[in-house]
Amino acid sequence: MPLGRFDDAGARRIALVAQGETPLESVELPARTTFVLGAERQGLPDDVLAGCDERATIPLSPASESLNVAIAGSIALYEWSRRHR
């Protein structure tokens, strides 16, 4: 998985946020997609969110509050790979 600077992403930037946005399964995920994840408690800063093309949420059961950032990233990568097999 390539890593790089946010400004150099060169791909559609999808911000993963805890709640209230488009469900991840409904978001377009082209071959060149960059997932942007923030800190587990604070999330992404407003200026970073403003630089993203779209915000997506991973739907959770009502009993769950949020996901660990590593798990959220893993789910996003799985969803991307499922569509690009």
Image (cartoon, grey):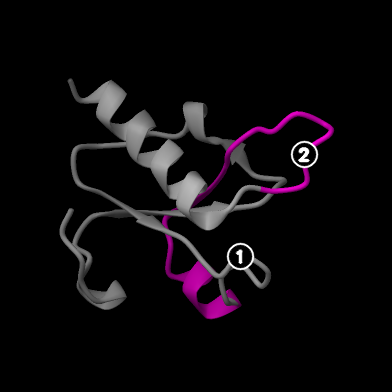
Residue 82 or 24: which is nearer the viewer? 82
Q: Looking at numbered disc 2 in the image, what kind of residue is underneath it?
A: Ser
Q: Residue at x 38, y 34 (%)?
A: 28
Query: Residue 76 bears which disc, if any?
Result: none
Q: Residue at x 48, y 74 (%)?
A: 48
Q: Residue at x 52, y 67 (%)?
A: 38
Residue that numbered label 2 is attached to: 64
Q: Quadrant of the C terminus?
A: top left
Residue that numbered label 1 is attached to: 40
As for residue 21 lying within the magenta part, the answer is: no
Q: Residue at x 77, y 39 (%)?
A: 64
Helix or strand or loop: what does disc 2 sit on? loop
Give coordinates of residue 47: x percent, y percent: 52, 79
Give coordinates of residue 20: x percent, y percent: 72, 45
Q: CA distance from mark 2 to mark 1?
A: 14 Å
Q: Is 32 on the left or on the right of 73, as rendered?
A: left
User: What segment carries the magenta color?
Assistant: 46-66
Residue 12 or 64: which is nearer the viewer? 64
